[in-house]
Image: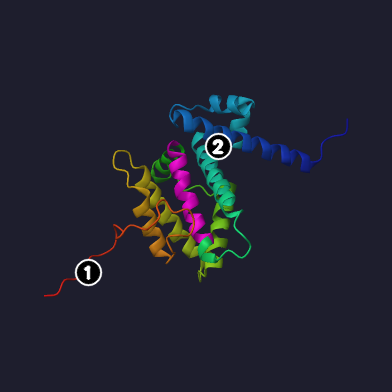
């Protein structure tokens, strides 16, 4: 039997990585991060336990890569059906909604991800291949929208989206989606009806908006 070519080997490695990341999301969705072990993930993915350590340097990095891939897939799936002539505002609104709804659809995964990246004792922010794909897609959307510096604007949007997700998921003190979405849409001057509005009309006054000054 002829040896496999490098391109075939690379495709097999990519498939194994994806199976591990998909299994991580599935198990953390069901059981939470702490209760999910690397052995569980390997079994769910149908791979040998040793392959987890071969592809990922620990559970934390696997968790973060899995979440970045989840967010990238959800974002790409939300943008794909848009017509070719969709406005840049529509694309940005769709992207914001995709991230917020990923947090609502996968709360355990997103809570675990946020807790890990905000913990200063576990390491720096991970810029893995999945995170770079997610960032590239968001920068493309921002460039179409008209950002003069898509890289800098991406950093701002990423922080704003993280804050929005924390608001949605903060245990015991969750903020409803409409005011968080209204805040983000106002930042980018996006009409409420674009994307996936959670209700027919925007809140009458976003929670962040300053009160009008009263006459003396």
Write down the quadrant of residue 159 in the picture.
bottom left
Q: In which quarter of the image is residue 119?
A: top left
Measured along the vertical axis of the image, is residue 148 above or below residue 66? below
Q: Tell me the quarter of the image containing the N terminus.
A: top right
Is residue 182 found inside the magenta-colored segment of the image? no
Q: For the residues marked 2 and 1, what is the alpha-carbon distance in whole angstroms?
A: 53 Å
**For the residue labelled by badge 1, is the local secondary structure a helix, a strand or a loop?**
loop
- Return the residue nearer the eye: 38 or 97: 97
Q: Is mark 2 on a helix, strand or loop?
A: loop
| Residue linked to disc 1 | 212
Q: Is the magenta stretch mostly helix, strand or loop?
A: helix
Q: What span is colored magenta in the figure?
A: 91-108
- Quadrant holding the C terminus: bottom left
Side of 98 relative to 210 (left or right): right
Q: How is the image coloured?
A: rainbow
Residue topped by disc 2 = 57
């Amino acid at each position: 039997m002829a040896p496999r070519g490098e391109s075939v080997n690379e495709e097999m490695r990519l498939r194994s990585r994806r199976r591990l990341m998909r299994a991580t999301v599935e198990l953390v969705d069901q059981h939470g991060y702490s209760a999910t072990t690397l052995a569980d993930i390997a079994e769910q993915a149908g791979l040998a336990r040793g392959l987890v350590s071969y592809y990922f340097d620990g559970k934390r990095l696997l968790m973060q890569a899995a979440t970045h891939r989840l967010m990238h897939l959800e974002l790409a799936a939300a943008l794909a059906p848009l017509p070719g002539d969709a406005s840049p505002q529509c694309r940005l609104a769709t992207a914001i909604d995709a991230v917020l709804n990923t947090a609502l659809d996968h709360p355990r995964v997103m809570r675990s991800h946020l807790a890990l990246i905000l913990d200063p004792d576990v390491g720096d922010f991970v810029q893995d291949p999945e995170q770079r794909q997610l960032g590239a897609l968001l920068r493309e959307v921002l460039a179409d929208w008209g950002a003069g510096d898509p890289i800098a604007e991406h950093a701002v949007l990423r922080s704003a989206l993280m804050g929005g997700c924390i608001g949605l998921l903060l245990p015991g003190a969750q903020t409803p989606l409409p005011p968080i979405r209204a805040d983000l849409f106002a930042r980018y001057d996006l009409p409420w009806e674009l994307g996936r509005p959670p209700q027919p009309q925007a809140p009458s006054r976003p929670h962040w908006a300053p009160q009008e000054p009263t006459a003396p």
